[in-house]
Image: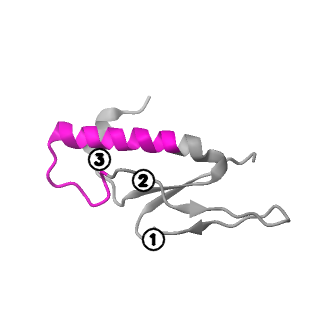
């Protein structure tokens, strides 16, 4: 069980972004909804005026796609800048 008080007191160093590949899109959407809800409720509850840029967003999902080659290998094309963020890549490793 996470220590919610510790999460509420800590401020991130960089904004969070989530790059989700197709096999893991549903899970990434669920994580995104929960993260958006948690952070918006925290900002409202604490009445924070000085929130870091990127802390409370409408979505943390990055626009990306993963084309596959005939050999089964793939590559990821990230269609927006993720420089200076904590990027989490969600992948279905068995797919």
Report the residue marked by disc 3. 10
* Left/right of residue 69 with respect to residue 20 in the rendered view: right
58 is higher (above) or lower (below) than 26 = below
Report the residue marked by disc 1. 81
* Left/right of residue 40 with respect to residue 26 in the rendered view: left
Mark earlier in primary sequence (3, 1): 3
Contact (Cβ within 8 Å) of mark 1 with mark 2: no
Q: Residue at x 50, y 43 (%)?
A: 29
Asked if the magenta segment contains residue 46, the reply would be yes
* Left/right of residue 80 with respect to residue 94 in the rendered view: left
Asked if the magenta segment contains residue 62, the reply would be no
Q: Secondary structure at mark 2?
A: loop
**Crowd band around label 2 with a 10 angstrom C-alpha radius: few (<14), some (14–19), many (20+):** many
Contact (Cβ within 8 Å) of mark 3 with mark 1: no
In magenta, the rendered stretch is: 29-56
Measured in 3D between alpha carbons, the distance from the residue under mark 3 to the one under mark 2, in whole angstroms, is 19 Å
The image shows residue 77 at horizontal and vertical percentages of: 60, 68
């Amino acid at each position: 069980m996470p220590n919610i008080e510790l999460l509420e007191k800590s401020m991130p160093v960089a904004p969070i972004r989530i790059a989700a590949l197709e096999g893991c899109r549903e899970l990434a959407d669920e994580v995104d909804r929960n993260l958006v809800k948690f952070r918006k409720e925290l900002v409202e509850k604490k009445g924070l005026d000085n929130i870091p840029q990127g802390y409370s967003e409408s979505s943390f999902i990055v626009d990306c796609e993963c084309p596959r080659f005939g050999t089964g290998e793939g590559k990821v094309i990230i269609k927006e800048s993720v420089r200076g963020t904590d990027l989490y890549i969600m992948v279905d490793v068995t797919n």
